[in-house]
Amino acid sequence: MKRLCLLVMCLGFTFHAQAQVPQAITDNQVSFHGGPVASTAADDTPTTTFRSGVDIVALNVVVTDSTEKFVNGLASTDFAVFEDGVQQDVSFFGASDVPLDLAILLDTSASMTDKLQTAQEAAIGFVSTLRSGDRVTIIDIKDATKVLFPMGADVSDARNAILATTARGGTALYNGTYLALKEMTKLRRGNGEVRRQAIVVLSDGADTASLLSYDDVLGLAKETGIAIYTISVRSKADLLRASREGHRYFSQSDFAMKSLAQETGAKAYFPSDISELAGVYSSIAQELANQYALGYTPKNPKKDGAYRRVIVRVTDKPDMRTRTRNGYLAARNR
C-alpha cells in the first residue's frame, strides 16, 4: 500500500472527484455474495445476478470454429472447465446478456502527435459500439495517468473526454495499466451484479516513464483476471528494422504486450499504420460482444496463494477452440 501511495504522489495519478485511488487488493478471486438471484428484464427474458457471499472464479471465454468465426448459441452444459486438471462445476453462465465494464487506455505521449486525431476518431467509434447496460472509462497515459471519464454509461461524455486529449510528454504505460487494474478491481467489489471486465491499451512504442515494471503489471493481471487487449502501433523505424532483420527482429515492448494479452485471455494487435486502428477496435468490439461468461467455485479450498492453471473446453466439439485467461492466483490466508 505504501508503494502504491508513493507511486500516486510521484505520478500525479488523477481521478475525478467521485473516483478514488483503490485500496490494495486482498481478494484474488472474484467475490459475489449470496446465491444466484433471478430477475426479469423488460422483455421478460430471465437474467441471473450474483450477490455477495460466494467466491467464484470468473472467466470470459471466446469460442471460435476452425475458420476463426465466433460460435454463438452454446449452453453451460457445452463447456467443461478444469482447474489444475480437476473438472469444476459451472455455477454461473451467461452469454451476450452479461454487461461489460470497459477501460480504454490511450497513449497520448509526444510521439502520438501526428497520430492523435486518427486515434481519437477510432476510439470514439469503439465507444459507439457499447450496448445498453455497458459502461466505459477513458484513461489518458503520459508521464502521469489521468482518468478523463470515470466508469459510466454516458457515451457522449466519453466521446468528449477522448476529444480533450492532447499529445505531450513520455509514456508511463505500465503505471497506467497497473492503476487501471486496481481501479477496476475496486469497482467490482460490493453488492453488484456480475459484469464482464476488459481493458484496451493503445500505445505507439516502448514504456519510457514508468516506475513500475512489466512484471508488476503481469502479476496484478493474474490476480485480477481482467482481460487486457493491447494495440501497439509500430513506428517507421521499427518497421524498417523488422523488414531488415526478418525473423531475428525482437522488440521487448512487443513481447511484453503480446504476453500480457495472452496471459489474460485477450489478443495483441500490431497494426503497421495508425489508419488500421479503426479496424482493430472493430475486431475487439466484435469479440467482446461474442464472449461467454462462466463462473465456478473452486473444488480446491486451500488459500495458499498458489497459481491455479485453468483450461476451458467445448465438450463433444473438438473443432471448436476456446480462449480465456490461463489461470489465477488463489487467495492467501493471513
Image (tube, rainbow, N blue to C red):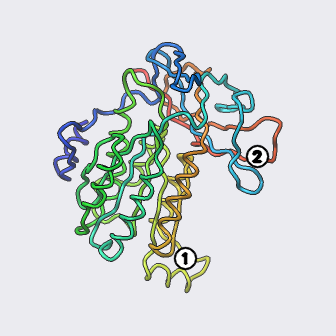
Query: Which labelled disc corresponds to residue 320?
Result: 2
Q: Earlier in the sequence, mark 1 or mark 2?
A: 1
Q: Is residue 205 visible?
A: no
Specify few, some or many for label 1: CA neighbours under 10 Å numbering under 14, 14-19, or 20 or more: few
How far apart are the alpha carbons under marks 1 and 2?
33 Å
Residues 216 and 129: in front is 129
> Residue 306: x, y in percent?
52, 32
Compared across the picture, whether 227 is left or right of 110 comes to right
Measuring 48% from the left and 70% from the top, which residue is drawn there?
Answer: 251
Q: Is residue 93 above or below residue 265?
A: above
Measuring 49% from the left and 22% from the top, which residue is drawn there?
Answer: 303
Q: Which mark is nearer the camera, 1 or 2? A: 2
> Residue 210: x, y in percent?
29, 58
Residues 92 and 171: in front is 92
Which of the 4 image quadrants contains residue 36? Answer: top right
Report which residue position mark 1 lands on.
249
Compared across the picture, whether 53 is left or right of 76 comes to left
Residue at the outermost front position: 43
Measuring 58% from the left and 77% from the top, which residue is drawn there?
Answer: 248
User: Label 2 is placed on what type of residue?
Assistant: Met
Specify few, some or many for label 2: CA neighbours under 10 Å numbering under 14, 14-19, or 20 or more: some
Local SS, label 2? loop
User: Label 1 is placed on what type of residue?
Assistant: Tyr
The quarter of the picture where the N terminus appears is: top left
Local SS, label 1? loop
> Residue 72: x, y in percent?
69, 41
The quarter of the picture where the C terminus appears is: top left
Q: Is residue 15 above or below residue 328?
A: below
Residues 327 and 191: in front is 191
Q: Is residue 75 above or below residue 321?
A: above
Q: Is residue 39 visible?
A: yes
> Residue 123: x, y in percent?
40, 59
